Image (cartoon, grey):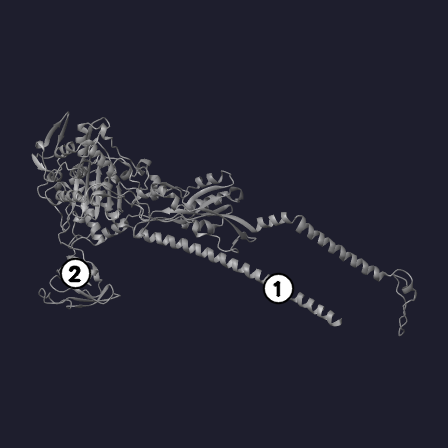
Amino acid sequence: MVFGRKAKIPRNKAVKKPAHQRVSGRDWGRFRLGFVGAFFCLVWISLWCRAFYVQIYRGPEFAAKATRQHLAPELVTGRRGSILDRNGQILARSVASKSVFVRPVEMTNVSETARVLASALEMPVSAVRAKIQERRRFTWIARKISDRAAVTIKDAKLPGVYLSTDYSRIYPNRQLAGRLLGFVGMDDQGLEGLELTQDEQLMGQDSKYVVQRDAAGRRLYLNGPERDPSIDGLDVRLTLDAQIQFFAEEALAEAVTSFEASWGGALMVDVETGDILAWAQVPSFNPNVYNRYSPSQWRNRVAADALEMGSTIKPFLIAAALEEGKITSDSLYYCENGRWQLHNVRIKDTHKYEWLPVEKVLRYSSNIGTAKIGLDLGASAYYSYLTRLGFGEKTGLPVRGESLGILRPANRWQEVDLANAAFGQGFSATMLQLAQAYLCLANGGVRKPLRLLADSTEHGPTERIFSEATAKTVLSMMRSVVEDDGTGRAARIPGISVGGKTGTAQKASPQGGYGDKYTGSFVGLIPAESPRYILMVVVDEPEKNHYGSVIAAPAFRQIAMRSMAYMGTLPDTGAGSTFTVAGEPELTERTPGVSEIRRDVSKTALADDSAVPDVRGRSLRWAVEAFARKGIIPTVKGDGLFVKKQSPQPGTPWPREGSQNYILWLSERS
Amino acid sequence: MNNGMSGWILGTILAAMTSLVLGLTLVWLNIERMDIAYGLQKLQVELDNSAAHGAKLELERDNLLAPYRLRRKAEEFGMRPAVPGQIRRLEDVQ
């Protein structure tokens, strides 16, 4: 056979292969087969080698690389717990919000990026540009931006601009209980108030997860839920009632503004449980914008300021003297016609009194009579009662900067100091301490702790300080302060027996001695005989008037009436007109409270007073009000809040009293 | 002997088929798993967004019902706090 040349093969003849091709030369077929086999073996071995190299030799290294690509650690921060009032109303809550940051090195068009960001964030372009040009790897542009701005930035898809999720702390009721709640910093850590003292409970925990991700970097949920709800902070429920808190703040603001005081505080306590229902301080403080206030304005004065409380201390002196058997309620004291010189100190009363029984010493708030009772009781006994009532020590409530007050040991008291302390001068106490002491008196003489956290399981000391008889006697005396001709007449509430004590304390001057600044206060007990609530109002450094009976008692009355109306316990006496006290000229100077302005419903509810109004389609409330103006309580039938049908028919003359049944049939819709 | 051989061959073929089916099932399951994972991720994002939105709405409601705001609105409508003589409770008239 000749390679490369075509053999001439005759047509129609069988082709015969040359014989020498089979027997001579090499067997190329076998060779080729062997070659291919060897090639495949080589490839196979190479593959196995490569597999060994990849899987065994460098396996761990590649596995680690793969893990780094497929799995990503993720730090998840739990949501901060909410602060709620006793009814579950939210006082503070954290909501997710976006923060925007940039990586300048990834940016393509700095000018355009700065312009878009500035427009979305309502910031000056120069400020944004300055932040971008810091040339750092990571720069915050704005934290906790609005949802609208976040959407605008996201839609702009700017290279190098990123959004991260943060939590913003919102106080939806604005200044309501602002100082008590406190506030948090940019990273959701408590900085003041309950936000700080309860930070451990409220704060969410950090948790690190390893999540799988795809080539695009998206997190995939292949191993169950990533997020563990237990890392969220716990809610804190307070004993406060948001509505009562509002009533207290509003009335207090009115008192502070009217009398141009520096500040005022109010506390309302439920005697049965010791729960603090209201904790108000004016001027107000809005924790949403805490940085607009100076640090001195963050101060929670109700707990932190120790004041000489004045005459509101007198009931404790009298209770102690009664308990020690030094006096009875009928014991007589000579009140020196309003002026008494004790050593080098002159003690004065606002009115001239001669002989007064103990009950009237308290009713008229005679300093001289009280000082003499104090001298009869003795310093060590009085001091012992004061300390057992909690003066000179913290109440233990979870508030920041609570003051101890100033109560010097009895062995350092001179006779004059004792006389002063008897009517609440010479030692100072916080409003909390005073509330706690009154809680003991109202609780039948047994001391119990105040409560601010509704879910708190801690129980403070309970100790009997006064006998039940002593407590009852003092409560009865306090009733006469308000309900008889005592100093607290402005606190009367029609239909309810109120007990209380006014206080007007001179403030110590920085130059020594006492200056011309005063603290006016009133502590009321509702009802007087078996108190359910204690309500305390303190107005500090008022300019226009300084008597507690004038500046604090009306605020007490306003808060108490509105709170009781809210709780459904205000008697419907019909005596809602402005309350005035005859023979107390200073009361005429006061500004009427908001609640004292009666709403005239006659024009709104009744177009024509001479005939039965058409109340069909009206709300039940409107209809009942319309009939109530005529002194009629209609019978209501059916369910719903709107009147479907009425009897008598509208337009018919009002039937004579008692001769007609008034029926309203209700429906769900108007 | 032939029967034994054909048994082995049959067994091998069956094992190969089973392996193939199991392998394909595994591939299918993994695809489904990834698919579900994407779905879960989407749902989780939706859930988070809805929860965040719900929280904001609740907050807005609380903001709208805040006593100070209600007080302002009440004043706008000429309303005042009720005093004794002006209060009727629904339970009293039912």
Choose between A521 and A275: the one closer to the eye: A275
Q: Amino acid at mark 2?
A: Ala
Question: In this rendering, do the residues under marks 1 and 2 share a single chain?
Answer: no
Q: The C terminus of chain A appears in which quarter of the rendering?
A: bottom left
Residue A626 falls in which quadrant of the image? bottom left
Q: Answer left or right for A106 relative to A142.
A: right
Q: Residue furthest bottom?
A: A12
Please determine whether, in this image, residue A625 is positioned above or below residue A17.
Answer: above
Q: Position of residue A30 (x, y in %)?
A: 84, 61
Which mark is on residue A182?
Answer: none
> At 49% from the left edge and 53% from the top edge, which residue is drawn?
A226
Q: Mark 1 to mark 2: distance in Å?
A: 81 Å
Q: What is the chain identity of the residue bearing mark 2? A: A
Q: Position of residue A173 (x, y in %)?
A: 31, 48
Which mark is on residue B22?
Answer: 1
Q: Answer left or right for A207 relative to A355.
A: right
Q: What is the chain identity of the residue bearing mark 1? A: B
Q: Is residue B80 visible?
A: no
Mark 2: secondary structure: helix
Residue A351 falls in which quadrant of the image? top left
Q: Which residue is mark 2?
A: A626
Q: Position of residue A167 (x, y in %)?
A: 41, 47
Q: Residue furthest top?
A: A344
Q: Residues within 10 Å of mark 1 (few under 14, many from 20)?
A: few
Mark 1: secondary structure: helix
Q: Answer left or right for A321 relative to A282.
A: left
